[in-house]
Image: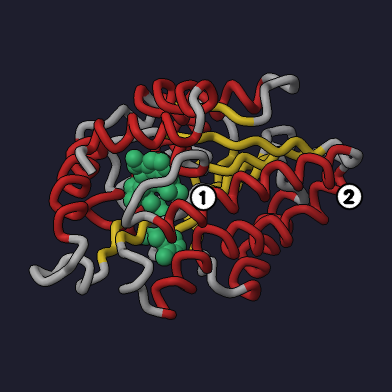
Amino acid sequence: MKNKRIVLITGASSGMGKQTAQYLASCGFIVYATTRTPNKLDDIKQDNLIPIKIDLTTQESINNTIQTIIKNHKKIDILINNAGYGLVSTVEDVTEEQMYDQFNINVFGVLRVSKAVIPIMRKQKSGLIINISSFLGKIGLPLLTLYNSSKYALEGITDSLRYELKDFNIRVHSIMPGFFDTKFVRDNLQINQNTFSQNSPYKHIVSSLVPTIVEQINNGNNSIEVAKLILDIIEDKNFKARVTAGDKAKKFIPIKKELSDEDFERRVREYYTI
Ligand SMILES: NC(=O)c1ccc[n+]([C@@H]2O[C@H](COP(=O)([O-])OP(=O)(O)OC[C@H]3O[C@@H](n4cnc5c(N)ncnc54)[C@H](OP(=O)(O)O)[C@@H]3O)[C@@H](O)[C@H]2O)c1
């Protein structure tokens, strides 16, 4: 028990987080699986997997959760920042609250948890942080400006932290998934009512883009791919800084790198008829 590696993963009640928590627990890691509502994980009775409540919007809740882990194990080896949701809204429609909430979870939540875990990893002179970003952390799409910018920010966090933490033997990585069949559309996609109203001047983009994206997520890749990728990153100290996961990310990120911004935009416009 003493030598087992301790994992903290956020947003572990469904999708990639849940799959990863279960997979790593089955590989012998002790996994603290955070959620706002731990009874969502009541169905899982698995050795080494411990559901734990966290509210990513308050540093106090995060600190309390981390103190519980430290009391039990005196260390945290791996932090996986996975929790996140998507807001679908035009910029002119978005409310102050929606804007702030999107960043409060996808960006500030990551910073708060990292802020609490980094001193522990620094003192133990080792650690690994994996941020679950998105291929939309490198590629923009209409109606997803807030989600996009939150994931672009997360990419920046990964890059900066890699410099900041290297001397303390703390590795930082980003995974950029494409489309994955999780509860993201069913439970964690929020829509702005004005953007989706019949009178919206953006009706054309909404009707051509949104059903396609929803369909792509619901028929997306299986989350086990991300779980296995996370294990690869854990076990390979020389793993590259960021990696794509899933068919669409593997296809579009290299194209984005090759083409000019304008040519890439043309390709995306054709693809989604926008
Ligand atoms: N599915 C995709 O196609 C896709 C593609 C690229 C990137 N991603 C990213 O992958 C990560 C995992 O998503 P998923 O697809 O596995 O989605 P999911 O099945 O919907 O799971 C999302 C998790 O995030 C947590 N979460 C959502 N909103 C939250 C909030 N306001 N406060 C705290 N926690 C919140 C949920 O935890 P609770 O139990 O607290 O609700 C849930 O466990 C996200 O960061 C997402 O942006 C997903």
Packing grade of label 2 (10 A; few <14, some 14-19, many >=20) is few
Pointer 1 residue: 151
Pointer 2 residue: 123
Seen at 74% across and 22% down, the residue is 237
- Mark 1 element type: helix
Seen at 51% across and 39% down, the residue is 138
Res. 206 image quadrant: bottom left
Seen at 61% across and 44% down, the residue is 155
- Point out the frontmost of discs 2 and 1: 1
Residue 68 image point, x, y percent: 65, 62
Q: Is residue 131 left or right of residue 197?
A: right
**As rendered, which of 62 and 163 lies closer to the eye?**
163
Residue 141 image point, x, y percent: 37, 47
Seen at 51% across and 58% down, the residue is 106
Question: How is colour applied across the structure in the image?
Answer: secondary structure
Report the amino acid beneath label 2. Lys
